[in-house]
Every structure is written in structure tokens, then in C-alpha cells.
Amino acid sequence: MSNADTGKTVPAPRHPDFKTVEASRPSWRDDASPSYTKTRKPDWKAGEGATDGGENLKKSHVEIDPYAEGRPSTFNYKLLISAIVPRPIGFVSTTSADGKVTNLSPFSFFQVMGFDPPLFVIGFSCSLEQAKDTLKNLVDTKECVINIISEDFIEAANMTSINAPYGVSEFPISGLHPAESRDVKAPRVKEAVFSIEANLVETREYRSRRTDKVSCTMAVVEGVRFWAREDAVNEERNALDISVLRPMSRLGGISYGRLTDCIELPRPDWNDLSADEKENFESESKSV
């Protein structure tokens, strides 16, 4: 990550004596596969609000001005990555302009933003002028592959965030295997259950409110081909089995999240409410 004010590298937060701390924790549970439970209150009805018995309403809040005098921009970074969770990880593979070097890097400022066309956004903490490996390759070649990270290669994916010099491929460092794509030159990650070949649509830079220097760049890419592992996708090719995908998410600091507990909630329909409920909510809405 880069400091928005100085452009210098900010050390990733590290757990003190991490290996000692890790050794004290329970072992990884292979049997902790995604499973479904009931919601906390299966008989919840429209208008009932939170299911905590009103405890949230007893709590106070503090205001935080992101531009407060003396507040470093890195404070906003740390706060936001601990609050906006879990975040999907865009595991992006690219190729240099001459096609000689591949690059592989994880991005937690990543999200799908449309389906027709399939559009995805990737955030970079740097300017185009100071573009690092992935952004440089993406701008030079106008293409990339987005791979979804699963549990069984999270350690390898994390290794690709190493600060290797430009020109050193993260594929051998991580031990992951490149697979040939069809419409772009950048390779897929063979181990990934789902991958997206994509073309660059546009980039846009944003300036720091403090220094007026470019502090981040947004890239929008369009998916032009999908790759799904056969045992994970259904016959209609329109859904993945979450128990096969087993995606990892990004949390704050050095933390990641597994998907183990799931619930299902059908989308509500206004027409399913009774006439009295509709009348009551319409009346209350006028006083809000």
C-alpha cells in the first residue's frame, strides 16, 4: 500500500511475534464447510427493526472527520479496511507490454459493478504516473484476468503481495500455475475455481484533499470471458456452488475471513404486505 500524502510505502500492519500468536490458536478446520442456518428471528415481520432487543439504540457514536487537522490519511485507510468488511479480493494477473513477464497481485479494493456488460472496478493507491506493476501492465496492455481466491491457496495468494521488484513474476514465488486464456494474453490462475478475462474500459485518477496530488486510481474493466471449474458450476452455467468455490474475503489489518455460516432471505415484495401494513407504513413515512 502507498501513503497518499507522500507516495512512500507504508509497512503492512504486522502481528507482534506472529508465529507465536498463531501457534496458540486452534488448528484449521477442514470440516468447516459453508452451511446454512436459520436467521436469528425467522418469524421477523416488517417494521420490527433490529433483533438485538434495542441494545444498539443504547449505544453512543463519535464523529470522525476524515480531514481533521493532524489526522494522517493512513488513519482513514486503517479505519475503512476494518469497517468495510468482508471485502471480495480481486486476484489480478497481468502481462508486461512485451509479453515477457507476468504479474499476479491481490486487491481488496475490488467489486463487480454491472452485468450487462459485466463490469468490475479495481482501486489502486497510486497515480498513473507512479503506477506499480499491475496498474502499469493493465494500462500498457489494456487487459487482465481477475481470479477468485479460494481457501486452498490463500497462503500462496498472500505471498503474491510481496514487494518483489518489477520484472519478477509472482507465479513462481507463490507456487501457483499459469493457465492459458483465450481472449487476453494475461494468464489465468489454474488453481482458481472462477476467473474472468477482462479488457480495460477506463481509468480515472483522484486527488488528495490535503495535498492536491493524485493519491489513487480507479480502473474499470469489462469481463469478456468467464472460466468456471466444471465441478463448481451448474448445468445452465449461471451459478457457482459456494461449497466448491469456498471464497476468502479481506478484513482489516492482516486478517482474512472464511465463508462458513450462511443464511437465506427471500427478497420482500410490497404486494405481500397486508392492506393495513401498507397504510400504516405510508402514513409513518410522511412523518419521517
Image (cartoon, rainbow, N blue to C red):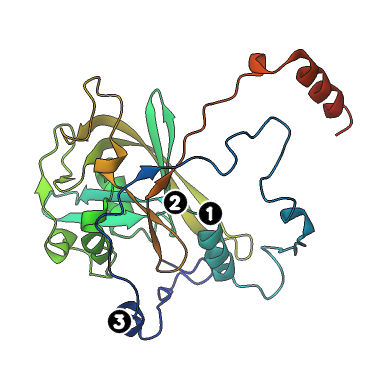
Look at the numbered disc 3 and give the secondary structure of its residue.
helix
Identify residue for label 3.
19
Decide which of tag 3 and tag 2 comes sooner along the chain: 3
Q: In this view, does 278 lie to the left or right of 18?
A: right
Q: Position of residue 266 (x, y in %)?
A: 52, 27
Report the quarter where the N terminus lies. Answer: bottom left
Please state which of the two labelled residues, at mark 1 or mark 3, is closer to the viewer: 3
Look at the numbered disc 1 and give the secondary structure of its residue.
loop
- Asked whether the beta carbons under mark 1 and mark 2 sit within 8 Å of each other, the answer is yes
Identify residue for label 2.
87
- Kind of residue sitting beneath label 1: Ile
Q: Which residue lies most toward the right here?
A: 287
**Label 1 packing within 10 angstroms: few (<14), some (14-19), many (20+):** few
- Depth check: give the residue in front, 177 or 120: 177
- Kind of residue sitting beneath label 3: Lys
Report the quarter where the C terminus lies. Answer: top right
- Depth check: give the residue in front, 286 or 22: 22
Q: Distance between the residues labelled 1 and 2?
A: 7 Å
Look at the numbered disc 2 and give the secondary structure of its residue.
strand
Mark drawn on residue 84 = 1
Above or below: residue 141 compared with residue 253: above
Decide which of tag 1 and tag 3 comes sooner along the chain: 3
- Asked whether the beta carbons under mark 3 and mark 2 sit within 8 Å of each other, the answer is no
Mark drawn on residue 108 = none
Residue under the point 12% across and 61% down: 175
Q: Distance between the residues labelled 3 and 2?
A: 25 Å
Q: Position of residue 10 (x, y in %)?
A: 43, 74
